[in-house]
Each structure stands twice: as structure tokens, then as C-alpha cells.
Amino acid sequence: QVQLVESGGGLVQAGGSLRLSCAASGSIFGISGMGWYRQGLGKQRELVATSSSGGNVNYADSVKGRFTISRDNAKNTVYLQMNSLKPEDTAVYYCYCNCKTEWAGTWRNYWGKGTLVTVSS
């Protein structure tokens, strides 16, 4: 199995910054995409940023220019640097990986349990 553990969430004032980390571990044969989603209270889970194994990145329009996703493939870790935070960024942030656990296995998404980011006005 694959486990993902997020860290770095917390309370920050508007305009501040946070850096989230997510490390994947377990029986990982390969990792393709990694990234972040978030879910605000009473809202649906939405994409924040993704990073492909080839280095392509994708951002939600609402975070472009403020958030930066990066990966350390040697550590199976993905990061999310969040700057100029706004109250509307308040949410539980979930990381995922599109991983394979064996050579003949199938690629599937695995999720972390989430880390809460609260931005006060």
C-alpha cells in the first residue's frame, strides 16, 4: 500500500505564507503525477496544483501567481508554497499521488488525510 502524509498547515494572517509538504511512502514502484486538492467548508473538493513526472505543472486560476508546486522525486515528496494567502484559501488541503505498487500493476490515485489551512482576515 501507499501512504501519503501532509504537513505544514496552520493558521496564518491574510497576506502571509505557508509551505505544505507531502511525503509518499510504502510499496511504491513508480510515481507519475503528484499534486494538491483542497476542500473548503461546505464546498466540493477542487484542484489546486498538479505536477507530472515530466515536470509539467498545472494550477487552478484562483492560485496562479501565488502558489508554487514542486517535487523532490528522490524523496517522493511534493511541496506547495503558498504566498499572499487570502481568507478564501481556507480549506483542508489534500495531496495525492498517481502511483503504481508493482511493475505489472495499474496506476491509481492515493490520497493523504489532509492538513488544515486557515487564513484569517
Image (spheres, rainbow, N blue to C red):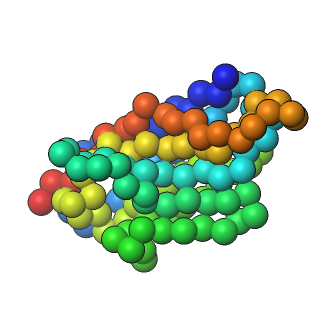
Q: Relative to 42, is 100 above or below?
A: above
Q: Choose top left, top right, bottom left or bottom right for residue 106.
A: top right
- Give the residue at x 12% y 60%: 121
- Give the residue at x 49% y 34%: 112
Residue 42 x/y as whole percent: 18, 45
Residue at the outermost right position:
103
Q: Choose top left, top right, bottom left or bottom right for residue 23.
A: top right
Determine if residue 75 is in view.
no
Residue 24 x/y as whole percent: 63, 35
Residue 50 x/y as whole percent: 55, 59
Residue 27 x/y as whole percent: 74, 25
Determine if residue 56 is in view.
yes
Decide if residue 78 is on the left or right side of residue 87.
right
Q: Quadrant of the N terminus?
A: top right
- State the residue in front, 10 or 90: 90
- Give the residue at x 62% y 60%: 51
Q: Relative to 101, is 37 above or below?
A: below
- Give the residue at x 66% y 68%: 56
